């Protein structure tokens, strides 16, 4: 069962790309592949081994070392311009990119439809066209719906990448490969069960849904990693409720940070809204995803990683509080965009859970 799924437990931007990359680097399988589900309506950030930072919307962040196979299954949504730009940016090996003939191609008409429909201003949508592309697929060429579905098999620039991705991944799995599915957005944005509809994304964002979009079987999965952040965010504007909303200035003041820590969205470049840690959406995410491990990122907004072995520090107190509130153990924490720390090591566990 060598499939890992990485999903977000709040409202996105939890650091899933970095975690996906860490799983790739920890893998010992003879072949490793990363699957990017969803579409380009959110960005994933990671640093390659040389320290160069990449903020990617289409290629998975787990592939920035350029040493894995990249898969876009039938359940993916591709903006051709974004994909081609990122392939050029990373100079990614073309023979390691695989795209299902049935993957969805986002068109300019679909992006324009979302803007005209008021989704960008009404719910904080990025206007990437993913929602419209999904609607076109579900409409099945209905006469009264203005948009048509476009498949990768009819997109000439993608011909060199086309193959039966499910068959190919099955062959890899039979050969003991490790496949990492890099989910997008977060549980609170989930269309069905996030609890904030209509201020939601156009897809279900659980591990089960990501697996469905990938085209693999539930019995292939042996690892589900739920990624959280110390202070959850939502995108700017009318994007929906954010419990215990605060400001970046208040967070910086509390942590004694003397620099600006304001975050901006990867796609729209708008200032993110930010809130205090709220356990309710996380507990729902845990129930829906049943993770084998939980990662808590952005701990640099609480304190320094050196404090992790100090039983009385803000860092250890925060981790313990989160574990109590969500009734689950935190396996890893992240203090930067470059790495995660395993709390299951003896020293860390002794400090936090003394």
Image: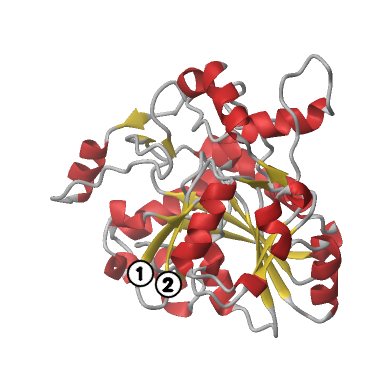
Query: Foreground: 165 or 209?
Result: 165
Residue drawn at the location 31% of the way across and 66% of the way down: 305
Number of numbered callouts drawn? 2
Marks 2 and 1, how far apart at CA = 6 Å
Q: Which mark is residue 20?
A: none
Mark 1, other Cα within 10 Å: few <14 / some 14–19 / many ≥20: few
Q: Which residue is mark 2?
A: 48
Q: Is residue 200 above or below residue 263?
A: above
Secondary structure state at the residue bearing disc 1: loop
Q: Residues within 10 Å of mark 2 (few under 14, many from 20)?
A: some
Q: In this rendering, is residue 237 above or below 82?
A: above
Q: Is residue 212 left or right of residue 106?
A: right
Q: Quadrant of the N terminus?
A: bottom right
Quarter the C terminus occupies: bottom left
Return the x and y of residue 283 as percentages of the image width and height.
60, 41
Vertical arrangement, residue 146 with respect to residue 245, above or below: above
> Looking at this view, is 187 or 156 the one in front?
156
> Quarter of the image holding residue 105?
top right
Camera-nearest residue between 6 and 352: 6
Task: Report the side of 162 relative to 319 (left or right).
Answer: right
Residue occupied by mark 1: 52
Q: Secondary structure beneath disc 2?
A: loop
Image coordinates of residue 161 in percent, x first then y, are 71, 64
Asked whether residue 330 is in view, the answer is no
User: Answer yes or no: do the residues labelled 2 and 1 have beta carbons within 8 Å?
Assistant: yes
Residue 30 in view here:
yes
Q: Position of residue 322 (x, y in %)?
A: 46, 49
**Side of 205 where 299 appears, left or right:** left
């Amino acid at each position: 069962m060598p499939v890992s799924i990485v999903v977000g437990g709040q409202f996105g931007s939890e650091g899933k790309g970095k975690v996906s990359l860490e799983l790739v680097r920890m893998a010992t399988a003879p072949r490793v592949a990363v699957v990017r589900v969803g579409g380009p309506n959110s960005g994933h950030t990671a640093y390659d081994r040389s320290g160069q930072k990449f903020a990617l919307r289409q290629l998975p962040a787990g592939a920035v070392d350029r040493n894995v196979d990249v898969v876009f299954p039938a359940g993916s949504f591709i903006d051709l311009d974004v994909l081609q730009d990122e392939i050029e940016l990373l100079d990614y090996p073309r023979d390691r990119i695989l795209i299902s003939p049935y993957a969805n191609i986002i068109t300019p008409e679909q992006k324009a439809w979302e803007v005209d429909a008021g989704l960008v201003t009404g719910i904080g949508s990025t206007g990437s066209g993913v929602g419209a592309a999904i609607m076109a697929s579900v409409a099945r060429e209905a006469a009264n719906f203005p948009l048509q579905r476009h498949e990768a098999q009819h997109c000439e620039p993608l011909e060199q990448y086309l193959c039966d991705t499910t068959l190919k991944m099955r062959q890899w799995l039979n050969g003991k490969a490790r496949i990492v599915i890099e989910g997008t957005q977060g549980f609170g944005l989930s269309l069905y069960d996030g609890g904030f509809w209509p201020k939601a994304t156009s897809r279900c964002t659980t591990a089960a849904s990501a697996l469905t979009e990938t085209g693999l079987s539930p019995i292939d999965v042996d690892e589900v990693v739920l990624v959280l952040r110390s202070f959850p965010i939502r995108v700017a504007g009318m994007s929906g409720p954010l419990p215990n909303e605060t400001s970046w200035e208040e967070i910086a003041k509390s942590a004694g940070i003397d620099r600006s820590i304001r975050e901006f969205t990867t796609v729209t470049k708008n200032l993110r809204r930010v809130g205090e840690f709220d356990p309710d959406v996380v507990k729902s995410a845990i129930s829906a995803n049943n993770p084998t491990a939980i990662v808590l990122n952005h701990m640099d907004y609480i304190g320094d990683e050196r404090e992790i072995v100090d039983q009385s520090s803000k860092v250890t107190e925060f981790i313990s509080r989160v574990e109590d509130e969500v009734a689950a153990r935190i396996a890893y924490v992240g203090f930067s965009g470059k790495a995660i720390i395993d709390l299951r090591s003896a020293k860390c566990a002794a400090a936090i859970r003394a």
